[in-house]
Image (tube, helix red, strand yellow):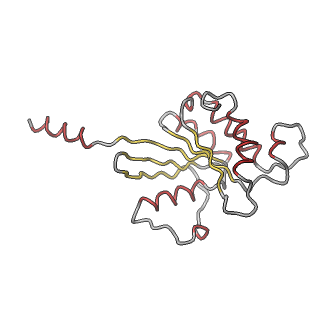
Amino acid sequence: MYHLAKGLYRYATSKEEYSVLLLGLDNAGKTTLHTQIKSLYSPHNPSPADPSQLKTVPTVGQNVSTIVLPDMYLKIWDIGGQHSLRKLWQSYYTSCHAIVFIIDSTDIGSGDLADLDSDSGDKDVGRLEECKLVLEDVLKSVETEGVPVLVLANKQDREDCVEVVRIKEGLVKRVLRGRRWWD
């Protein structure tokens, strides 16, 4: 009888666990976002008064934390964005429930987002072309099919950033064109 009651209690009080991947090129702000999310939900990790004072180092491998919410556990995986680490991303796809792809909206160079698909190699579009190719690679994987993807234009507080609308029109719509969830 004890085991039955214990099993029912465990079932009634259990929480689902969901995994979210934070992906993007190196220096996009994944670790800073991860740290800020942790500080929001953990009284033991207070956030600095000024987020610009937060010092992070490039992630080599991964940072992971579990956020306890009233009805679920949210496991957040901050995975390094250096070129040498991107091949490891696919090993996380099968167990993820959502992907947040972070773009550094200040790293576009002097060119126009419309130049991403053109043959004009002399235009400086910063790392957005690389970002576009990496995002396309993530979405081409069979394991990410049907997984919700949020594209986050980070560093919008800086004066040299590209507006979200331009990133949406110039990059995101092109990458997601033809995908089942984009109309």
State the count of labels. Answer: 0
Quadrant where the N terminus lies?
top left
Question: Where residue 62 sits in the image (x, y, percent)?
Answer: 53, 50
**Residue projecting furthest to the left:** 1
Question: Where residue 141 sits in the image (x, y, percent)?
Answer: 61, 30
Q: Nearer the viewer, residue 50 or 95?
A: 50
Q: Nearer the viewer, residue 29 or 56?
A: 29
Compared to 118, does 106 lie above or below?
Answer: below
Q: Nearer the viewer, residue 42 or 91?
A: 42
Would you say 180 lies left or right of 64 here? right
- Find residue 161 and report its image quarter: bottom right
Question: Where residue 41 sits in the image (x, y, percent)?
Answer: 42, 58
- Find residue 157 and report its image quarter: bottom right
Would you say 136 lies left or right of 150 here? right
- Find residue 5 and report its image quarter: top left
* Picture residue at 62% right of the left edge, 56% below the top: 29
Compared to 161, does 51 lie above or below?
Answer: below
Question: Where residue 16 sits in the image (x, y, percent)?
Answer: 36, 40
* Picture residue at 50% right of the left edge, 33% below the top: 94
Q: Nearer the viewer, residue 152 or 125?
A: 152
Would you say 8 lies left or right of 159 here? left
* Picture residue at 54% right of the left edge, 37% below the top: 148
Quadrant where the C terminus lies?
top right
